[in-house]
Image: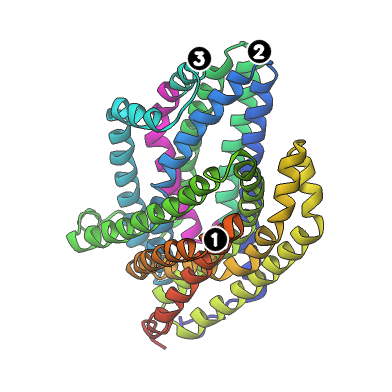
Amino acid sequence: MTAEAAPLPGHKQVLTVALPIVISGLTTPLIGLVDTAAIGQLGEAKYIAAVAVGALIFTFLYWAFGFLRMGTTGLTAQAHGAKDGAEIRAALGRALFIAGTAGLGLVLLQLPLREAAFSLIEAEAETESLARAYFGIRIWSAPFTLANFALLGWFIGQQRMKTALLLQLFLNGLNAGLDGLFVFGFEMGVEGIAYGTLIAETSAAFLGLALALRILKALPGGWDIARLKDKLALMRTVAVNRDIMIRTLLLMFAFAFFTAEGARQGDTVLAANTVLMQFVAFTAYFLDGFAFAAEALVGEALGARRREALKRAVALSTFWAALTALALTLGFAALGPYFIDLITTAEDVRASARLYLLWAAALPILSVWCYQLDGIFIGATRTGDMRNAAILSLATFLITWWALLPFGNHGLWAALSIFNFARALFLLRTYPRLVASAHA
C-alpha cells in the first residue's frame, strides 16, 4: 500500500492515541495525594509543608525542560510518517543526549539552584531544613527524569500509547509503594518521600530504555552515526527545543504572575484561586490527551506528506477535545460547589471560590483551542510560531490585567481567560502556512 493509498485517520485511531494519555495523566495527581497522605500520617504540619515546598521546586524546575517531551514527539512523529527508521533512532539518540547533558548540569549546579530556589520561598526554619534535605536527595534523579521526558515523547511520536501508559503507571505505582514503605516501614519521614521518588524515576528510565531497545530491534535499518551527528539535524533539534523552552517559560511566568496578583488581594482570595486552579489542572489531564493525539497524527501526516491526513487528524482530534471541554465546563458549572466543599472546609474560602467559579468553569471551553493548536504545531515542529504566539499572548495578558485592575479578582480571571484564548488566535493566524507545508 502506498503512502497516498493509506487510510485517513479515523475516530477510533484518535481515541486509541488519546485515551491512554488521559488515563496516564489522571494517575499523576494521585501520586501527590499519596505523598501528602503518607507524610500527613506523621501528625505535624512541618512535614507536609516540607514535601510541598520541595515538590514545588522540582515541578517548576522540570516544567522548564518539558521541551524534551514535546520536541521529541514532533520530530519522531515526522520520521515515523516518513517511515525513516534511521531518523527515528537518531531522534531518540539526540533527545537522550540532551536529557543526559541537561540532567548532569542540574546535578552539578545543585548548590546555586538550591540557594536560588529557597531565596524565593519563605518558610519556617525547620520546614526549610527538611525541604533542603528533600532537594538534596531528589536532585540526583535529574538525568533520569529528563530521560523519561525524552522516552515518553519518543513513544508518543510513534503512537505507542500503551507503552507510554505502561511507563507512567510503573513510575507512579512504584513511587506510591516506596512512599508507604519508607515512611511507614522504615520511618524515614521527608527523606523517605525523596528517596521513593528518586528510585521510582531512576527505575522508570531504565524500564523505558529497555522498552525502547525492544522497539528498536523491530525497526528497519540500523543506527547511522553520521545521521546522529548531522549538524543540520542537531541544529534543528536544538532550535525546536529552544523555542518550546522559551514558550514554556513565558507560560510559567503568566501563571506565576496570576498567583502573585491573587496573593496581593489577600489570603482568602489567594486560597480561593488555588482551589479553583485545581479545576484548571484537572482540565489539562483530559485535554492533553487529545493535544498529544494531534501531535502524533499531525507529525505522521507531515512526515508522509499527506495534506488530507493532516486536515483529518486536526478535525477529529479537535472534535473530541471540544466535546470533552464542553462536558468539563458543564460539569464544573453544575458540580463545582460540591468539589469546592471537598477541597476546603474554610467557609470564607468556600464563599470566595464560589464567587469566581464561573471563570474556572468557562476555562475548558475557552482554552481547548490553545491546547489543540499547541499539539498541532508541536507535531509540525513549527515551534517558532509557538514562541511568537506566547510572547504576543503574554503581552495581551499583562495589558488586559492592567486595564481590568478596577475589577479585582474578576479582572484577573478575565485576563487569564483572554490569555488562553489569545494563544489560540495568534497560532490560528499561521495555521494556513502549516497546512500548506504538507504536500498534497
Most common SS among magenta residues: helix
Q: Which residue is drawn at 50% across and 49% down?
A: 261
Dot 2 or dot 3: first in sequence order is 3
Crowd around label 2: few <14 · some 14–19 · many ≥20 (10 Å)? few
Crowd around label 1: few <14 · some 14–19 · many ≥20 (10 Å)? few
Crowd around label 3: few <14 · some 14–19 · many ≥20 (10 Å)? few
In this picture, residue 178 sits left or right of residue 387? right
The location of residue 396, given as percent across then percent down, is 43, 67
Amino acid beneath label 1: Pro
Q: Nearer the viewer, residue 411 or 87?
A: 411
> Bounds of the magenta span?
135-160
Residue highlighted by disc 3: 126
C-beta proximity under 8 Å, tags 2 and 1: no
Q: Is residue 221 magenta?
A: no
Residue highlighted by disc 2: 185
C-beta proximity under 8 Å, tags 1 and 3: no
Element on which disc 1 rests: helix
Residue furthest out toward the top: 186
